[in-house]
Amino acid sequence: MKISFHGAAHEVTGSCHLVECAGRKILIDCGMFQGRSELTEDNAAKFGFEPSEIDMVLLTHAHLDHCGRLPLLVKRGFKGEIIATSATRDLARLVMLDAAHLQEEEARRHHRHGRRGGSREALYDTMDALDAVDRFGRNATYRKTLSLFDGIEATFFDAGHILGSASIRLDLTEHGRTRKVLFSGDLGPDNRPLLNDADPPEDADIVVMETTYGERDHRGLEASIAEFLAAIRATTGRGGNVIIPTFALERAQELLWFLREGMASDEIEKSLRVFLDSPMAISATRIFARHDEALRPELAEIIRKGRDPFQLPELHFTRETQDSIALNEIRSGAVIMAGSGMCTGGRVRHHLRHHLARSESAVIFVGYAAEGTLARIIVDGAKHVKLFGEEIPVRAQIHTINGFSAHADQSDLKRWLARTRHPEKIFLVHGEKKSMEAFAKGLDPAKVVMPELHQSFEL
């Protein structure tokens, strides 16, 4: 038995872990690297294993940094089955097709403008993404064990991160010995309005654990909601617009819920115009209504009664490009939620181009920003940023509200790990170095490993 790490090693993105047992090779996630080298060298590089030799992929959830290289895996020879929860399957299809479209657009733009370095090929195209969708087989159900191969079983557990997200435990048997290896996937914080809390198993010999926020706790949710609504009131009061770089999965839906609650309590005007300027977020919101089995019971009950929990009096969906462009004519009194959350691509970059220089406007960051991303550069206090070849001054009010994060904080992570009954070994992944080291301080040093990229370990 072996495990090797081919992404999210000493960094937050690119989750990809390989387990070898009883002559089989099983991949846990196959995600994109995001940030300083998004869609370039790291993603185009060899995986660190031969794709055609992988027997199966188990997918924890549908975020791009966990599923984004599945089409490339298929393009390079993978012919096995992909297993995920039903909700993850639907969302991953959306995410992979969107990623393919964005890469095709970028490749065309690169060729059109004759940028230095010649033509740039997309990592994969829409057909590759559809080929990956075709590899999805069985749907996993929380806490129901699946037999994968002789001596290999998998059980999915609710991770509470986004719709359909899972932690996955592999029960591996080889030469008469069994090892239980638990992959946390990305974990969500407790007591969120849309999803159930993470529900880990109580036994694992080895844990592979995310540490995105391993060094700190989030601000309380109630205080974060109050700050969010106050920022909106202040911005509309001084005649500006609010730009929210939004992750399409979970964050967009949660923010719509908070806006709805804020209007119901008269903390913000019911006439406030809200634009969801993200085709993927619009589709993801529809998928939520399709998977009430993955939601908190009270929210599922609202949906079953035929009510839309995300509807606002002045909510507008802007699917078409020309509708998005038209938003530039609106100079005040609007909240514009657009992807991507880290500002690495998508429509939000155009809105930032039009509003960063306006002191009356505001940009509200409500999620994690990886090192090297435009979001991180702005959050860290840049006075100017480069967008579409222009130097744009940053005069807008910048708000960072980390209490909305879909990631567990340090206390949540510790509670989750404490429920696994003292594993023998803990591999820390999916975190920057400082985050992993801070989280490791509370653990037995003899048990903790922080693997390097492509490093392999005997189990």
Image (cartoon, helix red, strand yellow):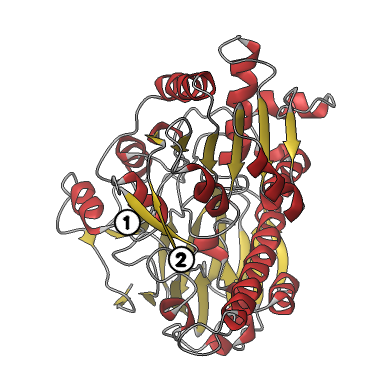
Q: Secondary structure at mark 1?
A: loop
Most distant residue in the top direction? 266
Locate the N terminus and report the quarter of the image it occupies: bottom left
At a point 68% along the width and 50% down the height, the residue shown is 325
Amino acid type at mark 1: Gly
Q: For this rendering, which residue is in front, 268 or 206?
A: 268
Lower position in the chain sequence, tag 1 or tag 2: 2
Which residue does the numbered mark 1 point to in the structure image?
Answer: 431
Image x and y of residue 69, in percent? 55, 73
Q: Secondary structure at mark 2?
A: loop
Residue 250 in view:
no
Amino acid type at mark 2: Gly
Which residue does the numbered mark 2 point to in the structure image?
Answer: 389
Residue 205 located left or right of residue 445 = right
Q: For this rendering, which residue is in front, 40 or 351?
A: 351
Residue 426 located left or right of residue 241 = left
Residue 29 located left or right of residue 141 = left
Q: CA distance from mark 1 to mark 2?
A: 31 Å
